[in-house]
Amino acid sequence: MLINTVNTKKFGSKLTLLVILLLCIIEYTSAKNTPKDDIAQLKNSSFTHLHTLSDSTLFYTDKLKKIALEIGDKEAESFAYQISGSYLIKKGEITKGFENTMKALHLSEEIKDWPDVSTICNNIGVFYFRKKDYKKALKYYLKGLESIRNGMYEADEITLEQRRHEVNMLLNIGEVYMKWGHNKLGLKYEDEAYVNAIKYNFEEEEAYVLAIKAQIYSNLGEMAEATSYINESIRHFENFDDQYALCEYKLMSAVYYFKSSNLKKAREQALEVYHLANSLEAMFFIKDVCELLAKIEKEDHNWKAAYNYVTEYNEIKAKIDNIEIETRVEKIKSSYESEKHISEIYSLKLEKEYNERVMNDQEKFIYVLVFIFIVSGIFIYFLYRFYRDLKVAYQKISDKNFKIEIQAEEIAAQRDHLQEYVELIDSKNRRISAGVNYATRIQNASLPIRSNIEKLCQELMLFYKPRDLVSGDFYYSSGILEGVEDEMAIIACSDCTGHGVPGAFMSLIGTGLLNEIIKVKRIISPKDILENLHLQLQMTLKQHESFGVQDGMDISIALINYTQKKVIVSSAKNSWLYYQDGKQFVMKGDRRSIGGMDLNSSAFQNHELDFSKKETLIYLYSDGYQDQLGGPNNKKFLVKRFRELIDEIHHLPAKEQEKILLHRFETWRKQQNESQTDDILVIGFKL
């Protein structure tokens, strides 16, 4: 009995060791990754699937958001919203994609992750830049610059990557101002980016800054500076061996040489682009360079070469158009298939997860079978564990199916209510149209009556044609001024920023300010009126504040002194014409606009004309007529053609002039079926 007891104890000890070993193996096989490991894995998976635009992207970002919310990881949650937002935008679901991107931005701001905030703002800015919504692009670029600078301020040590990010934001802001037409502001930011790029040896950013500065100088008409900067940029890209950048900027250099009438240099540079683009099979560059070469050869009277390049341009353009059509069709088909199978994809993913769990459980079950001959109790434990996991997995699948059914019902309900939304939109459109029609009546009431202006001169020609129901162009008349020694009157012609409703608001503000300056403050010198109007508009629109509206107007003002037989004219930006002895004289406006943060602070100038002995005709006008697209080549009417037209008709009666202006405008526009480009205002009066 003693021997049996000892053997039993030994067996019991061995059995205990085996049970402990089995439990360790089971725990090891059933051990799960930590949430941090899961987050890292899901980040990598979602990022990888985003690059292939796989529909699985949303599956992984949804899982990432769920885990991030559970453990309170806002950085991971922001990352999930960024990836899903980018995916949806690329798939064409702009609204939903932007909602996710804005959620990511708010989360990153909340945790003060300044590099992330800056990156998101930059991405949003790029999106609006490509849509040519430069106001919103500038808003987010400026916010991105502020964020990266906050990060630099709070950092113990500023890294080169932060400096590089700052240079890129400055570069982008300058480019927006350039595209928006604020070239001087754009140059200011590009100069700052250029200094920092050189200081920290960021050669690639330096090259892009030089290219943008070249475009700014080109816009300012300084072609020598533009050519110098673009050629310096090209030298940088040659060092990088960036073939596509060389195509783009050598083509730009060729354009600048062409604009400078240096046909030899333009042709050499364009031919380099032509050969490089063909070697890269870059059809867009081939198309653009063929178009430029055709212009160069045409200008040089090489008609055969010009014809060959035009033929090649049309062939490449047709190929590109066909490719774009095929791409759109494929994109529509892809989007349709994606939406059609989205629920199936989620179900398959869930099924895959379930299968993986089953496989893991089966592996555990194999371990249990190895030891089942040793102890039956362990088998029962494992079987119970297997049953419990299976039940949990089944419950999860049931919950998911239930959610899918609810979503299907919601979609059906939304479809039923779609017609209601359409009717609501129609109703709103009718209300908006009624409001705009009423605004037209208000604006017409604010303009001077024609018969009152006709009393101020021998003959009045007034050609006023708004682009929309309301206009950003307006004309002004003070009538005979009271409270002055001489008999005098003022006539003005103004072109406000924008057209339609925004332009109409500016025109009402302009009319009100002119009445205050002339009739209340008794300021009658045209140059003083312009200076006061500039200051008053800046104050009214709070343009010195960061949130102010940077709009303004170009305006010409004429003071007629009937007593002294003189007329004094001062003009902000707009040119004007006058005739004496049948000869046309062109007067340039001062290079300043009214309103906005214009860096040009030179004083406005008065120009005095004597009409005591000579019959004098004066023409004031906005840029709407000369900017109209049309004609045989679908180009602008241009100021030269406009002045020639005025020269043809100035001797005719006013009503006849107005008819000819309208007829010539409609003929030019309808040759290409173009709609009216801008508001139009031309005032001519005889003294």
Image (cartoon, rainbow, N blue to C red):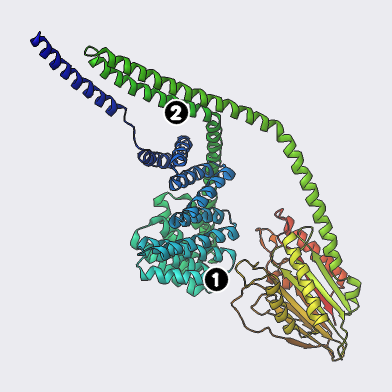
Q: Residue 272's image quarter?
A: bottom left
> Dot 1 corresponds to which residue?
185
Q: Amino acid at mark 2?
A: Lys
Name the residue at 52% across, 34% down.
334
Judge left or right: residue 453 versus residue 623: right
Question: Mark 2 sits on what residue?
Answer: 349
Residue 482 location, x and y as percent? 88, 84
* Helix, strand or loop for disc 1: helix
Left or right side of 176 for 385: left
Return the residue nearer the eye: 670 or 331.
331
Q: Position of residue 672 (x, y in %)?
A: 70, 54
Which label is found at residue 83? none
- The type of residue carrying mark 1 is Leu
Can see residue 594? no
User: Measured from the top left, where is residue 197 in percent x and y?
Assistant: 39, 68
Q: Is residue 390 above or below residue 28?
A: above
